Image (cartoon, helix red, strand yellow):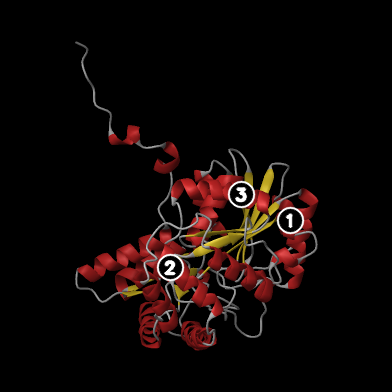
Amino acid sequence: MSEMTNRSPDEFIAARVRDLAPSPTLAVSDRARALKAQGIDVIDLGGGDPDFITPAHIRQAATDAMNAGDTHYVSSAGTPALRQAIAKKLLVDNGIEVDPIGGVVVTPGGKQSLFESILALVGPGDEVLVIEPSWVSYVPMIELAGGRPIPVALRPDDNWRVTPEILAAAVTPDSRVLIINSPNNPTGRVLDQAELTAIADLARDHDLLVFTDEMYEKIIHDGNQHVSIATLPGMAERTLTFNGFSKAYAMTGWRLGYVAGPKPYIAEIEKIHSHSVTCATSFVQAAGVVALTGPQDFIPDMVSAWDRRRRAVATGLNAVKGISCPLVEGAFYAFPDIRETGKSSVEVADLLLQEGHVALVPGVAFGQAGEGHLRLSFATSDDLLDKAVQRIGDVFGRR
């Protein structure tokens, strides 16, 4: 009988997963929870979860749907009612015309819609241009699909502006997709018309698909305006628009998002969707219909609170030695510049967690372009934010 040998666990793990970094934002929250479990009073500003509860009429819609027996499988692409509501929303709010039948896939969260779309449309060796600083999951998703993420690094000293020159320097014959995110997580920038035009020109000239993540579209400050790139000339046929309910409707835990765009691409995305999650939760989709078609007045109320908090955070951090915090244009994150401290973003984040008991995300987690910065979520209470800024000042001193 031949001698048996046991493989190590590493031999069973696929290389594409073994080499994948965990989510940095979730890692920060995990560290904060671990310290809290030890009895340490940690203020966690690492996540992006609104502190507002989902509005009552949306919660009631889910309850009513469950009590009516809406607890079964539904159409994989989404219930007809929700797809129709999404199509109407895109037309009225964004000027985007999509067919609710074949042009929309409803997913368990916006992250899932991006993941499925990248798996469907990015193959081994395909280059995907990622404008950085960027949300932490774009690059790992591209890597899992076998694609090559190509950073398009923006400059903090130019207010993270997208320029034709920066785009042209990154594109190659192997480029297939360009991912944009406006309002941006983590920088808070809202792309203006000139930037959108530069992106559209590049996409048309080099025959690229554009993935536009518009999750924070309703959270905009100081009169800035959100424009969907799919509305620019020649872009509807080459743009996939991603959005969801987590931020604007305070529905992070419900996990409900969608992708909309040209039918040939949506059909391929739906294949992956049907073989992975089957469908988004039935009664959650019923709540999604009510979210889109019901009262919207609570959204400006939340944005007003976030506006107040972003101003308070910026004022407080600008008084701390070595930190500069301009007012962001959209979303609910501050992205303070900590280059004057002389420390890396990881070093500063570790110092603040260990000595100040404040959890922030190091800027390098959002790509090398984010180094020298930290991301701070102000989607939490005024009191906790005041305490956090006070603790940061205690660590670094005040001007």
CB under 8 Å between callouts 3 and 2?
Answer: no
Dot 2 or dot 1, earlier in sequence:
1
Name the residue located 51 percent from the left edge and 52 percent from the top edge: 115
* Mark-to-mark CA distance, 2 and 1: 30 Å
Indicate which disc residue 267 carries: 3
Give neighbour class at mark 3: few <14, some 14-19, many 20+ (Cα, 10 Å). Answer: some
Indicate which disc residue 52 carries: none
**Residue 305 percent location from the top left of the image:** 48, 87
Dot 3 or dot 2, earlier in sequence:
3
Dot 3 or dot 1, earlier in sequence:
1
Residue 149 visible in image: no
On screen, residue 371 versus residue 2, left or right, reads right
Amino acid type, mark 1: Glu
**Residue 294 percent location from the top left of the image:** 53, 81
Secondary element at image label 1 = helix
**Residue 285 percent location from the top left of the image:** 47, 67
Against 77, is 18 above or below? above
**Residue 196 percent location from the top left of the image:** 73, 66
**Image quarter (top left, top right, bottom left or bottom right) of the N terminus:** top left
Name the residue located 68 percent from the left edge and 63 percent from the top edge: 98
Mark whose residue sits in front, 3 or 1 = 3
Amino acid type, mark 3: Ala
**Residue at the outermost top position:** 1
Closest to the observer, 377 or 85: 85
Mark whose residue sits in front, 2 or 1 = 2
Secondary element at image label 3 = helix
Closest to the observer, 188 or 351: 188
* Mark-to-mark CA distance, 3 and 1: 14 Å
Secondary element at image label 2 = helix
Query: Where does label 1 land, which residue?
Result: 237
